[in-house]
Image: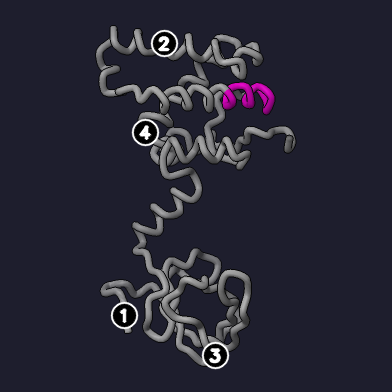
Amino acid sequence: MNAYPRDDDQFQDVYVSSVRAEDGGWGATRSDGWSFFVRSDSPIAPQEGMPARFYGKGIGYPVRGLFLAGVRVFYRTVDEEREHHEIQTYGADAADWLARWDEGRTVWSIEMGGLGPGYEQCIHITAAEVLRHLLAKRYDAEKWEDREQRKRDLDEIEKAAFANPTIGALGLSGAQWGAALNVATMLYIRGPRATLTDESVKDRLIQVSRTFPGAP
């Protein structure tokens, strides 16, 4: 028996009405008719008639905790759930964002041009390649407070970018290059979570993919 979290009254108590084996765990139905899934690495297997406590705002909202017969299957506080959601949505850090891009997954970014998807795609392909360079070289962004150091590093970044055949083939305008560099450095310095949840860009969020406009 695990102790239930203190000072967290955002939960619903139900019973497990049925259980079925599925790949990777168990599918189960609650006494109120809603279904849920328990992974095979759960410390306890769901069983018919077992009490179940779900943490969260309720139906239609994310489940941030599950206890079966008083045993914790998983649990996150409200703040931990917010962090978990942001990581799942935007990426844990710049390297995670780039890995998702490289896999051909859809990632969140910021609309920088306002001139259509083709224009944006050039910006974000470039941003990804610049971010790759930044991560490989591990620039110390704190030193960019020094104008001379910032200029030296930016000159090096630009030189490396336009020697990159992926970027070179795009025929970028100066505005596109500036926008791509802006996205890449924001992701590198602040990380995707802080960058993409900033109030100043909330109306410019877009989803982009390396494979746009179609799978290779």
Question: Is residue 86 or residue 137 the one in the foreground?
Answer: 137
Residue 159 at x, y percent in the picture: 48, 9
The residue under label 3 is: 48
User: Is residue 174 on the magenta stretch?
Assistant: no
> What amino acid is found at the position of numbered circle 4 in the picture?
Arg
Question: Are the two marked residues, 1 and 3, in contact with CB atoms closer than 8 angstroms?
Answer: no
Nearest to viewer (mark 4 / mark 1): 1
Residue 91 visible in the picture = yes
Q: Which residue is mark 4?
A: 190
Q: Which mark, by number, is residue 2?
A: 1
Would residue 190 appear left or right of 211 to someone viewing this image? left
The percent position of residue 128, horizontal first and vertical second, equals 53, 27
Q: CA distance from mark 2 to mark 4?
A: 21 Å
Mark 2 and mark 1: Cα distance apart in space? 55 Å
Task: Indicate which disc, 2 or 1, sits on the residue closer to the N terminus.
Answer: 1
Q: Which residues are magenta?
A: 115-125
Looking at numbered disc 3 in the image, what kind of residue is underneath it? Answer: Glu
For the point 34% across and 57% down, the residue is 79
Within the image, what quadrant is residue 104 found in?
top right
